């Protein structure tokens, strides 16, 4: 599984969360999350994870990233900060 090749980016003691973004795919998000979670021994944190595993599925293509919260662009946060 591809996740085992990059899961070393999640250090010992760090928590993680898995996010699935799908378009044109019938694959079950729950099935994907279960398979990935079996590969990673770290604890899960849904509210404040140290790392986020982002799985993007577009039809037959899949992309996998391991990110920090700060690496994700939030349009809502950007709009709020610009209006202040």
Image (cartoon, helix red, strand yellow):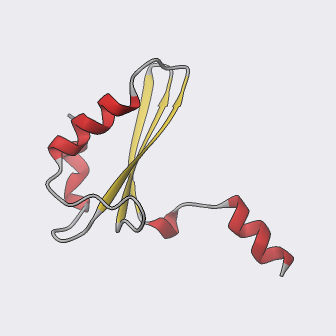
Question: Horizontal placement of 1 versus 29: left or right?
Answer: left
Residue 27: name its quadrant.
top left
Residue at left 85%, top 75%? 83
Compared to residue 57, the image places residue 53 above or below, namely below
Asked if 59 appears above or below 39 in the picture, the reply is: above
Q: Which residue is drawn at 45% across and 19% down?
A: 60
Classify the position of the C terminus by image quarter: bottom right
Q: Position of residue 70 (x, y in %)?
A: 51, 70
**Number of marks in picture:** 0
Q: Which residue is drawn at 22% across and 35% down?
A: 35
Residue 2 visible here = no
Q: Can residue 27 be seen in this view?
A: yes
Residue 48, percent from left and from top: 40, 68
Side (left or right) of 45 relative to 62: left
Q: Which image quarter is the N terminus in?
A: top left
On the picture, is 33 further left or further right than 40? Answer: right
State the image quarter where residue 81 is shown: bottom right
Q: In this view, which residue lies farthest toward the right?
A: 83
- Give percent across and percent down for residue 71: 50, 65
Q: Residue at x 72, y 68 (%)?
A: 78
């Amino acid at each position: 599984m591809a996740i085992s090749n990059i899961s070393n980016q999640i250090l010992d003691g760090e928590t993680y969360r898995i996010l699935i973004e799908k378009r044109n795919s019938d694959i079950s998000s729950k099935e994907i999350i279960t398979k990935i979670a079996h590969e990673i021994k770290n604890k899960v944190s849904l509210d404040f994870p140290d790392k986020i595993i982002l799985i993007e599925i577009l039809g037959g293509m899949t992309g996998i990233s391991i990110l920090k919260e700060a690496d994700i662009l939030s349009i809502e946060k950007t709009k709020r900060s610009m209006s202040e």
